[in-house]
Image: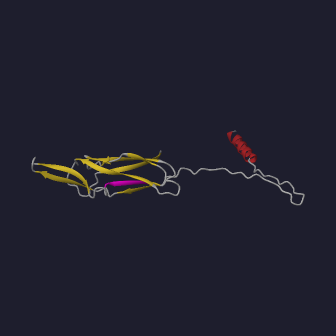
């Protein structure tokens, strides 16, 4: 019974959809005219996300320094090229304003390393029509003591960039 009712409903909808055709009024005199209305509908573009992320190499050195005054070692995380290898740039070519957020996750094998972006989130407006992409950046800083010191190009964590409509 449901199938029959569905069929009848579909057929009713199909036959009720008819194209509107304006019949022309006959022109019966020299220089006569006829007029028809022209209509238009504005259809806004859907949200288009076009975001580029430029990653620094995200390479760091865990540097041990002997401090003779206190007869102890000091340990520091230093980007292999500060201001370049630790930089993450996000550029927005979307037609919408976006929220950008960063989250660091430490590795499960080499624990103890903490990653903190210098800016954890920001908003990027959509560019002006015909203009250049809007962009901003953050630097990833590392701290903490790794669970082992024999690091040689060892993965210590990962960083995730999340984009949402603002």
- Residue furthest to the top: 1
- Residue furthest to the front: 31
Relative side of 160 to 35, left or right: left
Q: Check the picture and name the quadrant holding the N terminus.
A: top right
| Residue 47 image offset from top left, x and y in percent | 53, 50
Given residues 109 and 43, the one toward you in this image is 43
Given residues 58 and 106, the one toward you in this image is 58
Given residues 43 and 35, the one toward you in this image is 35
| Residue 42 image offset from top left, x and y in percent | 64, 50
Relative side of 118 to 93, left or right: left
Region rendered in magenta:
86-91
Q: Residue at x 89, y 60 (%)?
A: 30
| Residue 90 image offset from top left, x and y in percent | 41, 53
Q: Is residue 53 above or below residue 123?
A: below
Relative side of 94 to 45, left or right: left
Q: Residue at x 24, y 51 (%)?
A: 77
| Residue 163 image offset from top left, x and y in percent | 44, 48
Q: Residue at x 82, y 53 (%)?
A: 23
In the image, is residue 90 part of the stretch drawn in magenta? yes
In the image, is residue 139 part of the stretch drawn in magenta? no
């Amino acid at each position: 019974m449901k199938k029959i009712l569905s069929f009848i409903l579909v057929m009713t909808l199909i036959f009720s959809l008819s194209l509107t055709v304006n019949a022309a009024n006959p022109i019966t005199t020299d220089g006569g005219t006829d007029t028809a209305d022209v209509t238009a509908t504005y259809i806004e573009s859907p949200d288009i996300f076009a975001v580029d992320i430029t990653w620094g190499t995200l390479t760091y050195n865990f540097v041990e320094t002997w401090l003779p005054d206190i007869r102890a070692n000091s340990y520091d995380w230093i980007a292999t090229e500060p201001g370049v290898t630790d930089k993450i740039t996000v550029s927005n070519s979307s037609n919408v304003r976006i929220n950008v957020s960063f989250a660091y996750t430490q590795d499960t094998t080499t624990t103890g390393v903490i990653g903190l972006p210098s800016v954890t989130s920001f908003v990027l407006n959509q560019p002006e029509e015909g203009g250049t992409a809007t962009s901003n950046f953050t630097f990833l800083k590392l701290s903490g003591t790794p669970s082992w010191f024999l690091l040689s190009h060892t993965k210590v964590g990962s960083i995730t960039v999340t984009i949402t409509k603002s």
